[in-house]
Image (cartoon, rainbow, N blue to C red):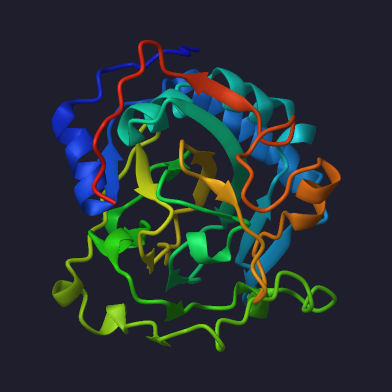
Amino acid sequence: MNSGLLRTITPDEVETYHRDGVLLLSGMFDKDWIELLNKGIDTNIKTPTRRSRIWYKDTSGRSMFYDHTAWQNIDEYKKFIFNSPAAKICGRLMGSATINFFFDSVFVRSTGTQFETPWHQDEPYWSVEGYDACSIWMPLVPVKKKSSLSFVPGSHRWKTVFKQYNFGDLNPVGKKNVDQVDFSDIAEQELPNINADPERFGVVSWDIQPGDCIAFNGRTMHGGSGKLDDDCELRVFTTKWAGDDIRIKFRDYGMDPDHSVEMIEKGLKPGDCLGTDMYPRIWTRINYKKIKKHS
């Protein structure tokens, strides 16, 4: 189980990340990390947190399981967060001096599931804001391009405030009032219909093998397929990381996930950097030199 980078992240990859807001990184995690996280997801499914959701279930029993912020109770997740190369990958890509962990999320689709992820940007939902937010989307099984998460390159630089999708609408009965977000009062326009003309938006997705990951900015538009063949499942462990300019922000229109209660309990307030044992600092750059970013 290797805690260091398995290979160098090249200057071209760093440039691509800042230009496009998304980047496929091949061969970044060894098989031990994959096995560890698969074990952790098995535990997570058996003992979900109060934040877990079944976002989709059809008449054949095919389903989409989602949970987040489970790391403090799952040893495998905790080991990955503190010891894997993930924080270093984000630090190298963003050019940040320090990297704090934000939160984890898991997405498990059973074989043949036809749930399609609504297009959205992440940052508008979060209890933080800033350019230096990086997500590591890490599948633990092979993923075909047609079933993989898709992205709109360059959309992290869009200035328009969109009416984002309310994922609370996917919650099961009994949790309908949780994680509700309503962008109506702040939105400048509806989300573009990306599926209607993916070529116009330059949509990208990739075939991915375990050990590969996709790194993307919190402002990058993503969504799309996720529709699986009858013999394919999808197991994804995603981690969210905060770099230098990330600050806490509580949003009047709602947050998903809403960390405001936990943040306040830890003594954190709007404008603060992430910290405490809830958002630990995982990585610090040695001999830090500011890297110009394209925000």
- 286 to 163, vertically: above or below: above
Q: For the point 29% across and 49% down, which residue is it?
A: 22
Is residue 111 visible to the viewer in this orientation of the structure? yes
Q: Is residue 170 left or right of residue 119?
A: right
- 265 to 191, vertically: above or below: above
Q: Which of the pair 192/49 is nearer the observer?
A: 192
Q: For the point 41% across and 13% down, which residue is it?
A: 4
Residue 206 in picture, x, y percent from top left: 26, 51
Residue 61 in picture, x, y percent from top left: 66, 69
Q: Is residue 118 left or right of residue 12?
A: right
Q: Which of the pair 220/265 is nearer the observer?
A: 265
- 37 to 68, vertically: above or below: above
Q: Is residue 192 left or right of residue 63?
A: left
Residue 42 in picture, x, y percent from top left: 69, 39
Residue 285 in picture, x, y percent from top left: 41, 18
Q: For the point 58% across and 35% down, which residue is it?
A: 101
Q: Is residue 292 left or right of residue 136?
A: left
Quarter residue 152 falls in: bottom left
Q: Residue furthest front?
A: 271
Quarter residue 150 falls in: bottom left
- In this figure, what is the number of numbered marks? 0
- 190 to 63, vertically: above or below: below
Q: For the point 51% across and 66% down, which residue is it?
A: 124
Is residue 151 visible to the viewer in this orientation of the structure? no
Q: Which of the pair 82/15 is nearer the observer?
A: 15
Quarter residue 7 falls in: top left
